[in-house]
């Protein structure tokens, strides 16, 4: 056997013996928690990635798509046919659909035969029946609805629905359409109809909010050739998408979500790191005798180091594997919570996150466990004769440097960018320091109390303040875990409730859009007659910003994604004689009488796009161009839910351009029937239900927060691992003290009460600090982010204290119970 | 500088010693200034000899044992172990010199609590890379009468049994020299006698050189040479 193989065999044996003796239990537990957190998030985000990859080819239902708000010109189809490309048109828009008195907002999609060109539709004969691929599209006179829409309408296969001015029969249940992408944040259910039926519905009028798509598919060369030909012929209002550009916002959103979950997992790794460090230190202390003996038997320092390094690597590997296994199980929970948001069924996870879990294990042992163990090589052989000889304590500067480096590496890896990593690290460090200061102050205060309590409590309190350093570490680790959970559960509820409370009760909850000019007066009268007050209808013209001053506007000029999106989209332009009541002029002045070529711009938009007072803006509207000089900037209260516009012209400036009208109003509960009446009378008008939208948004927030909370449970588990490691570290000492106390006449009950007192107090400190931290964070979020006054919830403090006292009390008691079960004599004989 | 112990030294015509100390001294810093623990120790030990170092507590016996075994370095003088001057070696060099050649028995047994009896005996054999570690350890345990307790942990053994395991551990690699520090110090008289009997039996069987530190004159009498230390100086039995 070679020397290396011999060393490995020796290290394996040593690891096995240590494991058998329970020496590694806490270290491995902390390690497994750390790796499980990273693995759970890794496996989950990997499944999401697989969904995206699987759908990438199908996401467009085509190889190339030309999309826009206007119908594509016929020559685009003709050219595709000439080049041998398959082509089909689709049209999507939101509209209210009725089944007798039940109404629901649906996302309508009118498709031509041939759709989809890539992938396939899946339909079922009835709701919740098995779905099968189909090459057909809805025949004229029929529609296919998804299960959600049928449920909302109380309809089934065979029902006849009012779609605009038409009545169409549901013949199948639509289970899947390739270009719907992930179901993420889709707000309205789907109704699919034949494109040929569209004119009869009278739903689409000039200026309606619709998206036309021309789908194209063929050989890669033919597609590329068509794309080149398209070049400059593409109208400004249309965009080209190919597979690479399919749903970038989804990709970005998921990447961001993955990164956030990853950082949440790192919080668990950092806290677990403390547990690993404490456990490793105890391990090193307990192995000094073994190393001294080995040195006596002739083992060199290098070999001692090699032996323990191999053992550490084995532990890292084993912890990583076990953590990956546990993480794989845990991600099923995460998928159950979040999976629906990402599109129903998720594919099984791949093995790609495994190396990440293993790497986490190795980095964690290297960063947190290696320094104390490396100190072992310095144990002098003379220790066999003189036990007081030992290397300096394992917590050297090197240990702190290595722990910091490991933390930085882990955070940077999950954050993906140095700036974010630096913020996260600085934030964590600052929070830990503040918690540590709080813990220090509280333990000092406790020390003063001990003269005023009974013997058992004095025993417990004395332990907390005597082991000051260890107490602070435990309070901070557990407090951090509790704090994030408190922020996520209680503060979130408080914040959402506070935000809702800040909305006036009469805030508009319905929007009517796509109102044709001829319907404005009738609609106003109907709303008034229904007792909804004098509704103001605002004109709306869609136009794309093409020029600021002399500079043509292009998305490429702006680095921020928000600015890019704004430039790519069409704006809603309006005209008004006077500013809306909730608008305020912050620069310049409102239009004077007779003003024509002037505009008033919302200040936030102006800031994002770099528009200044006096700039001349040019918009392209339905092939014409409109210009105006910026004469005022306005602030707008967007969360009032009143209709507002980024860009407003003076009356007359937009005459002759296709306009629709829009209004918002408050529909009292129980008046839903009014909507059905309105839609029947004005089939082209679209009703947007803000209540439904808000509850959908709330549901998404709830689920995302639940997912994050789930990941933070690992942090709490890591905090408990720290507690357990700290208990282990003082176990020999505790056993000796308890034996001494019992020898001196303390009953088992008194010793037990002392232990309960100690852990309950530790838990109370952690809980109180966590509540303080969570309140401060909640206050900051309310003031800085949500902009409303935050009322601290006493429940927060109660929950924090209770969770701390019971969680830590029980865990602590479980960890130290063994102290009581040993006969005092045996303990005293063995010494500390 | 290296000479093979046991062979005759060409210059002196005497056997080359396995342990030799020359003007050995050890001082340590203390709050009251420098404290002399050992001073001017000269001794030689031929292979197979048995040397007892006796003296009261604090006379420097254990310090001398540590210096002779290369566990510590003297502040004055030199030590040759198995023909090599220890001060020419670094810490690892001294460890390599001990490997497989030097055995130890301690007052407090120094068994590793997490290892079974047989694993404790196997440890030095495994560290030396012996493929027959398990068989040899079992055999040696049988020799000290503990074959049936091989799978027991130290905590499950009596003091005498623990010291017998320690003897098995010390003798299993068949070291050239064995250092024993108060081997009966933690045992009652009867058990101590059993352990001592076993120690000298094994020593005779294997021809091991023995250096034994004790304050027990009865134990010292088993050895063919005795040295008495008093306040760090040799008072009786200087080199023959």
Image (cartoon, coloured by chain):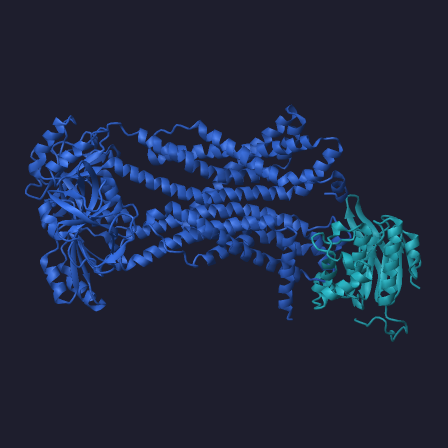
Chain colours: A blue, B cyan
Q: Horizontal and vertical percent for residue A739? A: 72, 37
Seen from the viewer's position, the closer of residues A552 and B133 is B133
Residue A768 seen: no
Q: Residue at x 15, y 53 (%)?
A: A139
Q: Is residue A602 above or below residue A45?
A: above
Q: Residue furthest top?
A: A452
Q: Is residue A655 above or below residue B93?
A: above
Q: Horizontal and vertical percent for residue A687? A: 18, 38
Q: Is residue A764 above or below residue A134?
A: above
Instruction: Determine which quarter of the picture holds residue A641.
Output: top left
Residue A256 seen: yes
Q: Horizontal and vertical percent for residue B18? A: 84, 67
Q: Residue at x 23, y 67 (%)?
A: A220
Viewport quadrant of the C terminus of chain B:
bottom right
Seen from the viewer's position, the closer of residues A293 and A750 is A750
Q: Residue at x 35, y 36 (%)?
A: A785
Q: Horizontal and vertical percent for residue A596? A: 8, 39
Instruction: Determine which quarter of the picture holds residue A616.
Output: top left
């Amino acid at each position: 056997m070679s020397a290396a193989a011999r060393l490995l065999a020796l290290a394996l044996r040593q690891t096995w013996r240590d494991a058998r003796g329970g020496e590694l239990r806490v270290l491995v537990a902390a390690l497994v928690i750390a790796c499980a957190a990273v693995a759970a998030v890794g496996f989950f985000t990997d499944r999401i990635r697989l969904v995206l990859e699987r759908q990438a080819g199908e996401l467009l239902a085509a190889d190339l798509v030309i999309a826009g708000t206007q119908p594509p010109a016929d020559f685009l189809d003709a050219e595709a046919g000439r080049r041998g490309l398959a082509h089909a048109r689709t049209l999507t828009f939101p509209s209210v659909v009725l089944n007798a008195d039940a109404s629901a907002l649906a996302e309508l999609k009118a498709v031509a035969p041939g759709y989809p060109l890539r992938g396939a539709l899946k339909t079922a004969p009835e709701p919740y029946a098995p779905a099968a691929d189909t090459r057909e599209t809805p025949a004229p006179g029929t529609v296919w609805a998804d299960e959600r829409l049928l449920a909302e309408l109380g309809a089934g296969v065979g029902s006849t629905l009012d779609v605009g001015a038409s009545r169409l029969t549901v013949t199948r249940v639509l289970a899947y359409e390739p270009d719907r992408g992930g179901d993420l944040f889709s707000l309205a259910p789907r109704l699919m109809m034949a494109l040929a039926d569209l004119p009869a519905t009278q739903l689409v009028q000039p200026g309606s909010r619709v998206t036309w798509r021309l789908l194209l598919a063929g050989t890669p060369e033919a597609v590329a050739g068509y794309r080149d030909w398209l070049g400059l012929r593409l109208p400004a209002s249309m965009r080209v998408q190919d597979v690479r550009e399919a749903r970038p916002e989804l990709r970005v959103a998921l990447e961001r979500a993955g990164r956030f979950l990853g950082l949440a997992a790192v919080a668990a790794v950092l806290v677990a790191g403390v547990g690993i460090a404490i456990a490793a230190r105890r391990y090193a202390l307990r192995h000094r005798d073994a190393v001294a003996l080995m040195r006596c038997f002739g083992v060199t320092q290098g070999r001692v180091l090699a032996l323990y390094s191999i053992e550490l690597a084995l532990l890292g590997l084993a912890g990583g594997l076990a953590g990956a296994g546990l993480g794989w199980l845990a991600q099923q929970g995460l998928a159950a919570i979040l999976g629906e948001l990402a599109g129903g069924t998720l594919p099984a996870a791949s093995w790609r996150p495994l190396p990440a879990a293993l790497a986490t294990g190795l980095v964690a042992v290297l960063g947190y466990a290696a320094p104390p163990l490396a100190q072992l090589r310095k144990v002098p052989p003379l220790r066999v004769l003189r036990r007081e000889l030992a290397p300096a304590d394992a917590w050297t500067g090197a240990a702190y440097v290595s722990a910091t480096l490991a933390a930085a590496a882990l955070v940077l890896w999950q954050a993906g960018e140095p700036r974010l990593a630096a913020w996260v690290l600085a934030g964590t460090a600052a929070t830990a320091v503040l918690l540590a200061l709080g813990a220090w102050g509280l333990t000092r205060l406790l020390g003063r109390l001990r003269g005023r309590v009974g013997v058992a409590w004095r025993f417990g309190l004395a332990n907390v303040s005597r082991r000051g350093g260890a107490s602070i570490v435990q309070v901070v680790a557990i407090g951090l875990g509790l704090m994030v959970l408190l922020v996520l559960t209680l503060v979130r509820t408080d914040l959402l409730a506070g935000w809702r409370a800040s909305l006036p009760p009469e805030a508009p909850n319905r929007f009517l859009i796509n109102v044709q000019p001829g319907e404005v007066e009738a609609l106003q009268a109907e709303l008034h007659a229904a007792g909804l007050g004098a509704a103001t209808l605002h004109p709306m013209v869609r136009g794309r910003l093409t020029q600021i001053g002399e500079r043509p506007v292009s998305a490429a000029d702006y680095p921020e994604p928000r600015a890019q999106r704004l430039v790519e989209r069409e704006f809603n332009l309006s005209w008004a004689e006077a500013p809306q009541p909730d608008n305020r002029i912050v620069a310049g002045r409102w239009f004077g009488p007779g003003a024509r070529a002037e505009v008033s711009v919302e200040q936030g938009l102006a800031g994002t796009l770099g528009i200044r007072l006096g700039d001349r803006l040019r918009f392209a509207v339905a092939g014409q161009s409109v210009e105006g000089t910026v004469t005022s900037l306005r602030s707008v209260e967007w969360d009032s839910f009143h209709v507002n516009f980024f860009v407003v012209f003076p009356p007359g400036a937009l005459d002759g351009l296709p306009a629709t009208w829009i209004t918002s109003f408050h529909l009292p509960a129980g008046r839903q029937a009014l909507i059905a009446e309105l839609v029947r009378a004005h089939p082209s008008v679209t009703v947007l239900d803000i209540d439904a939208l808000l509850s959908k948004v709330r549901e998404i927030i709830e689920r995302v927060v639940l997912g994050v909370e789930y990941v933070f449970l690992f942090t709490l588990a890591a905090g408990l691992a720290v507690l357990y490691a700290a208990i282990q570290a003082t176990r020999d000492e505790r056993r000796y003290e308890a034996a001494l106390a019992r020898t001196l006449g303390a009953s088992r009950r008194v010793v037990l009460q002392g232990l309960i007192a100690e852990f309950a107090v530790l838990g109370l400190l952690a809980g109180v600090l966590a509540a303080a931290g969570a309140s401060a964070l909640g206050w900051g979020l309310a003031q800085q982010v949500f902009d409303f006054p935050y009322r601290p919830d006493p429940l927060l403090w109660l929950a924090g204290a209770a969770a701390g006292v019971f969680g830590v009390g029980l865990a602590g008691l479980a960890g130290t119970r063994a102290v009581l079960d040993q006969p005092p004599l045996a303990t005293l004989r063995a010494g500390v | 500088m290296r000479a093979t112990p046991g062979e005759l030294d060409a210059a002196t015509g005497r056997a080359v010693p396995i342990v030799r100390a020359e003007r050995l001294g050890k001082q340590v810093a203390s709050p009251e200034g420098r404290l002399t623990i050992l001073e001017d120790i000269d001794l030689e030990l031929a292979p197979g000899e048995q040397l007892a170092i006796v003296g009261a507590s604090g006379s420097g016996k254990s310090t001398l044992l540590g210096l002779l075994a290369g566990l510590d370095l003297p502040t004055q003088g030199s030590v040759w172990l198995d023909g090599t001057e220890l001060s020419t070696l670094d810490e690892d060099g001294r460890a390599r010199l001990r490997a497989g050649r030097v055995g130890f028995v301690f007052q407090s047994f120094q068994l590793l609590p997490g290892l079974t009896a047989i694993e404790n005996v196997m440890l030095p054999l495994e560290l030396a890379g012996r493929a027959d570690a398990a068989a040899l350890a079992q055999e040696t345990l049988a020799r000290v009468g503990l074959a049936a307790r091989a799978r027991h942990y130290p905590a499950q053994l009596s003091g005498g049994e623990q010291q017998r395991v320690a003897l098995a551990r010390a003798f299993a690699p068949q070291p050239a020299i064995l250092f024993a520090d108060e081997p009966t110090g933690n045992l009652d008289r009867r058990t101590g006698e059993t352990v001592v009997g076993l120690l000298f039996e094994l020593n005779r069987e294997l021809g091991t050189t023995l250096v034994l530190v004790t304050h027990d004159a009865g134990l010292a009498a088993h050895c063919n040479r005795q040295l008495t230390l008093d306040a760090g100086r040799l008072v009786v039995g200087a080199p023959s």
